[in-house]
Structures are given as structure tokens and as C-alpha cells.
Amino acid sequence: SVSTWRLPRTSLLPLAVFVVALGGCRVEVASVKAANVDFAEGAYAAAGEAYENAIATVERPSAEEIRLRYNLGSAYYKQDEAAKASGQLQQAAERVAPNSAHGGEGSATRPSDHAHETDFGEVDTAFQFAAYYNLGNAFYREREYSRAAESLQAALVVNPDDEDAKHNLELALEELRSQMSVGGAPDDDTPNP
């Protein structure tokens, strides 16, 4: 029997060479570093505010925006704001995997059509895995078990050997089966358990 949910990976992703000039706007490395320090010290609201401000000034779409959204989602998750966390993490996951084959039409983790956008090769598969894994955790916290399972399945496409993702997927599927057995109607995008 599977017992406890394994925690999300809320470590922050560094923002490589993060000084971006846009029409007079400039995101300074110092403000993002300060946000990372706030996060590390448990000041998640302050960190989140700084990440939001940085997102407002960074080029879109870009690797920096993806990393900032991941960090913002992590800050929201730490503040028990799962709905806000899932919104940011979903945007990060979708943008890092524009040509991914998982997820069907209308699914929670179906990558948006960003094929026309810049290649984000500098955002690696470890990041992609973390974004989907944490997205699954946020959906689970919201009791959206089908979306949690779908996100965790997406994480396992990237890293099929991760034991925590396998464990959490089994828990999400157990909750989904339980929900269905008591007459609950799962979302239309429910994966087949």
C-alpha cells in the first residue's frame, strides 16, 4: 500500500546571465538574486513579488521567463496557493516542451503550440521534469487528481526512472479511482488508470 505523498522539488532554477534589456526596461541580476535569498529564507511572498516584477520586464517567450515562472510557481506553492502555483508551473512546463508528444487535445499539460517560437534548448530536461513534477504536486494539493496524474505521467516521459514521480502518480491514480468509485465525476481529461 502506498502511503504518503512525496514533496515537490521547490529548489530554484538559476537564471543564467540574467541581465536583459528591453525597450528601456532592465531586469537586474541583483533583484533576482535577492528574490532567491528571500525564498531560501522562507520569505516566499517577497520572493514571489520580485519574480512577478521580473516577469513583467523580461522578453517573452524566453528561457529567463520560463525559469522565473517556475520560481514564482514554487513560491506560490510554498505559500499554500496551489491554484496560483499550478498556473505558473503549467506555463513553464508548456513553454519548455513545445514539441512534446504527450497530452491530448484539451489536456491540462498539453503543450501549447509554441512551435513558431524560439528554441529553449538552454532549458534542459531536468528543468522540464521538475516543472511537470511540481505541477502534479500542485494539482494534487488542489484535489485535481486527473490533472495531477497527467502531469506526473508527463514528468515520467522525461525521466522514467524517478521513484518519487512513480510513487506520487500511484497516489494520484488511487485518489482518482476512489473518487470515481464514490460517484465523483473526474475531469474530461482523465488518464486511464
Image (cartoon, rainbow, N blue to C red):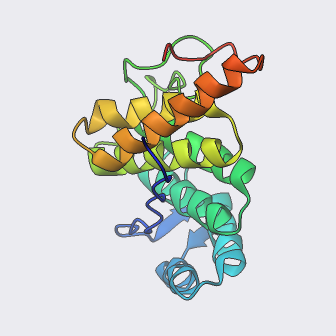
> In which quadrant of the rendered view does residue 41 lie?
bottom right
Q: How many marks?
A: 0
Task: Determine the residue located farthest toward the left in the rendered image.
Answer: 161
Tell me which corner region of the image, top left, top right, bottom left or bottom right, holds residue 182. Answer: top right
Image coordinates for residue 71, horizontal then vertical, percent: 53, 63
| Residue occupying the point 61% across, 43% down | 140
Query: In the rendered image, which quarter is residue 188 located in?
Result: top right
| Residue 176 appears in the picture as rendered | yes
Question: In this picture, is 85 found above or below 183?
Answer: below
Tell me where residue 171 appears, x and y as whole percent. 50, 39
Residue at the far front: name it: 1
Q: Is residue 36 above or below residue 180?
A: below
Identify which residue, 40 or 180, lies in the foreground: 180
Say which of 4 and 145 sits in front. Answer: 4
Q: Quadrant of the N terminus?
A: top left
Horizontal and vertical percent for residue 185?
Answer: 76, 16
Q: Is residue 97 visible?
A: no
At 51% from the left and 27% from the top, the residue drawn is: 150
Looking at the image, is 20 positioned above or below residue 44? above
- Where is residue 79 shown, x and y percent of the image? 70, 69
Q: Is residue 18 left or right of residue 68?
A: left
Whether residue 154 sits left or right of residue 122 in the image: it is right
Residue at 57% x, 40% y is 90
